[in-house]
């Protein structure tokens, strides 16, 4: 944890073990952590943090095998907390599930994403408004590392046709949402052997833009200088926008 000037020492989350990166989301009176089990364990788990203590992790969906990938979770700018993940085993199709409070999850509410397969894990970000269904943006790399995205205006009931994004990655996409305005995306490790970290302004849809000029993004643009990674980055948003 950080108080804005310094970081506390790392502490293990009790009972949390995973072979993939976890997903962390704030809201519903605390932090919520989601992760896939270690090794061949394809269950999804959840633990909550109240500001002082972690509530011990519990398997979701009655302990059924759910995914072979890491999960992605929305920010708190949606009416529900959403998880996105691939299927279990060799099933690389995209699944999503909403929860009213981040804690209660029902396998009957799991829905299919766009009719496509992903080469890594899918990422989801969203926003909502008074009397409106959650608006969700989903992004994923295919088996060749090309990034695609799709938009749902009705809480994952229908999706736009998948659109190509001018980005390539062997891992997933990290999203950060700004509430009622733009969501931002970051990614790393392109199939061409570049290990730089890149980012883009999604403008809440399938056309991504340069964060500064707002011109449509081109391949290889918006690389963060002197930053590189073998794994996907994580991204968060705070404060007010500069425009």
Image: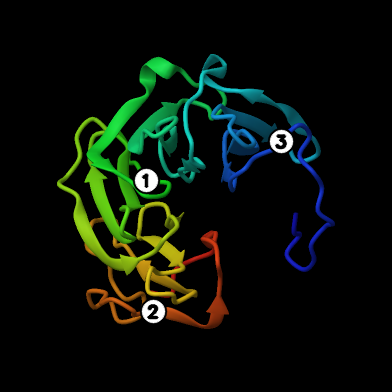
Q: Residues within 10 Å of mark 1 (few under 14, many from 20)?
A: many
Q: How is the image coloured?
A: rainbow
Q: Earlier in the sequence, mark 2 or mark 3?
A: 3
Q: Residues within 10 Å of mark 3 (few under 14, many from 20)?
A: some
Q: Earlier in the sequence, mark 1 or mark 3?
A: 3
Q: Secondary structure at mark 2?
A: loop
**Residue 54 or residue 80, whichever sits in front:** 54
Q: How far is disc 1 from disc 2 in space, using C-alphas?
A: 23 Å
Q: Residue 75: image x %, image y %?
A: 48, 46
Q: Which residue is mark 3?
A: 16
- Above or below, 207 against 33 in this view is below
Q: Which residue is mark 2?
A: 222
Task: State which quadrant residue 96 falls in.
Answer: top left
Task: State which quadrant residue 53 falls in.
Answer: top right
Q: Can residue 177 be seen by looking at this rendering?
A: no
Q: Nearer the viewer, mark 1 or mark 2?
A: 2
Q: Secondary structure at mark 1?
A: strand
Q: Which residue is mark 1?
A: 126
Q: Nearer the viewer, mark 1 or mark 3?
A: 3
Q: Residue at x 84, y 56 (%)?
A: 9
Q: How far is disc 1 from disc 3 in space, using C-alphas?
A: 27 Å
Q: Earlier in the sequence, mark 1 or mark 2?
A: 1
Q: Residue at x 76, y 59 (%)?
A: 3
Q: Residue 14: image x %, image y %?
A: 79, 34
Tag 2–tag 3 contact (CB < 8 Å): no
Q: How far is disc 2 from disc 3 in space, using C-alphas?
A: 35 Å
Q: Can residue 173 be seen by looking at this rendering?
A: yes
Q: Secondary structure at mark 3?
A: loop
């Amino acid at each position: 944890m950080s108080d804005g000037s310094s970081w506390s020492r790392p502490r293990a989350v009790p009972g949390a073990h995973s072979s993939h990166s976890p997903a962390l989301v704030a809201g519903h009176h605390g932090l919520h952590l989601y992760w896939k089990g270690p090794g061949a364990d394809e269950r999804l788990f959840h633990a909550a943090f109240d500001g002082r203590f972690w509530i011990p992790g519990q398997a979701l969906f009655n302990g059924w095998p759910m995914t072979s990938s890491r999960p992605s979770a929305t920010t708190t700018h949606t009416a529900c907390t959403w998880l996105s993940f691939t299927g279990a085993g060799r099933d690389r199709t995209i699944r999503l599930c909403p929860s009213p409070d981040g804690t209660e999850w029902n396998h009957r509410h799991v829905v299919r994403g766009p009719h496509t397969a992903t080469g890594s894990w899918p990422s989801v970000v969203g926003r909502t408004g008074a009397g409106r269904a959650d608006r969700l943006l989903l992004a994923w790399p295919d088996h060749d590392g090309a990034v695609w995205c799709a938009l749902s205006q009705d809480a994952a009931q229908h999706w736009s046709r998948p659109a190509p994004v001018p980005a390539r990655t062997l891992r997933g996409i990290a999203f950060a949402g700004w509430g009622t305005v733009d969501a931002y995306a970051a990614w790393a490790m392109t199939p061409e052997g570049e290990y730089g970290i890149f980012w883009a302004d999604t403008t809440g849809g399938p056309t991504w833009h340069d964060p500064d000029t707002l011109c449509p993004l081109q391949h290889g643009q918006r690389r963060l200088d002197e930053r590189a990674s073998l794994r996907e980055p994580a991204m968060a948003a705070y404060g007010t926008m500069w425009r």
